Image (cartoon, helix red, strand yellow):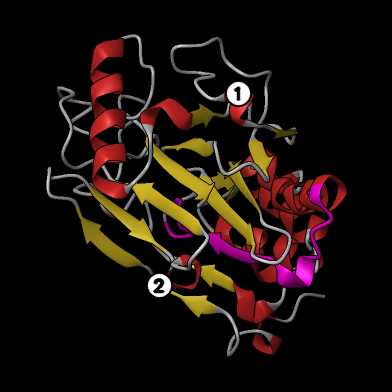
Amino acid sequence: MFDASKYAALIQHGYLFYKGENGTSCLRAEALCLPGVAHAFSTREGGVSPAPFDTLNLSWNEKDCFANAVENFTRFCTAFGFAYSELTIINYEHGVNVLPVTRADCGRGFEKPPLPFCDALVTDDPGVTLVTSHADCGALFFYDPVNRAVGMAHAGWKGTLGRIGQRTVETMQACYGCAPENIIAAIGPCICRDCFEVDKALGERFAAAFDDPAIYSPGKPGKAQLDLARAALIQLLDAGIEPAHITMMDACTYHEPSLFFSYRRDKGKTGSMSGFIKLT
């Protein structure tokens, strides 16, 4: 059974907040602010999209034009040191497919056709920036400073239950020889336990899958409050990542309407944030 007390003193918590000169902003994990890697999680500030996508909407929404998304991505990249021409974005289906990419994939999902369905990307190529999309689902960041590889995962409840984080680590091992004990990881913003109501049966599935009765709390009759970040933490530990190499940003997308889009809070009428990571 998972015992959180064994790791509580080792796991890092919180995030650093950065404001760009053009009004955009981002969150970063301090443990990943290292030479050799660049990462960021966007907020909704500083873009050009109209309500309800206001303002830095980083998604291709049929009710918000493509030109707005391009301008928003360009503004964010300019502020935080990414090149728009080097981006490649997941083509998520709330699954567990992890796709290795190279600079040949730059532009996929932007001006080039999307990648095959995937909820995580990995690379050892410094010429490509990995990008994921989020509006309550978790963002998982990975960096191996020894074998020089990065990964980025989108973790909704389906992907989390399927252990998308653990699969990302396994793919970095298989493709780039990464040792889990060298990997530095961060669990980015996502909807928190207090805001994420699910059917009780789903809460029980998570408790069984992660051997952790505390992964959900009782809710309304027939409902449960599910802790996605805790499930992400357990699978990263199970993958062999050292507790001291894991940061939980502890930011709830539902609770912070001024900073984050939230699919659940906004009843589907909302934009998306993005996670970014690249080798430098």
Left or right: 262, with 174 as reference point = left
Pointer 2 residue: 14
> Quick check: is 193 in the magenta stretch?
yes
> Height in image: 211 above or below 74?
below
Q: Mark number for residue 63? A: none
**How far apart are the two marked residues, 1 and 2, measured between alpha carbons?**
32 Å
Q: Split into 4 quadrants, where in the image is the N terminus? A: bottom right
Whether residue 199 can be seen here: no
Q: In which quarter of the image is residue 183?
A: bottom right
Do the numbered discs 1 and 2 sit on residues whose CB atoms are within 8 Å? no
Classify 78 as above or below 205: above
Residue under the point 18% across and 30% down: 54
SS at mark 2? Answer: loop
Range covered by the magenta-colored residues:
176-194
In this rendering, is residue 205 above or below 61? Answer: below
The three-letter amino acid code for the residue at tag 2 is Gly
**Which amino acid does the dot numbered 1 rest on?**
Asp
Say left or right for 208 vs 274: right
Q: How many marks?
A: 2
Of 107 and 28, the residue lying toward us? 107
Give yes or no for residue 213 being in the magenta stretch.
no
Residue 34: give x, y in percent of width and height: 48, 68
Residue position for label 1: 105
The tag earlier along the polypeptide, 1 or 2, is 2
Density class for disc 1 (Cα within 10 Å; few <14, some 14-19, many ≥20) is many
* Residue 115, position as x, y percentages in the image: 63, 19
Point out residue 190 in the picture as x, y percentages from the top left corner: 46, 51
Q: How far from the left and from the top, in percent, is residue 36?
A: 52, 60
Q: Which residue is drawn at 84% across and 55% down?
A: 177
Looking at the image, can residue 234 be seen?
yes
Residue density around tag 2, few if under 14, some if 14–19, many if 20 or more, within 10 Å: some
Question: Image point 80% across, 69% down: which residue?
Answer: 240
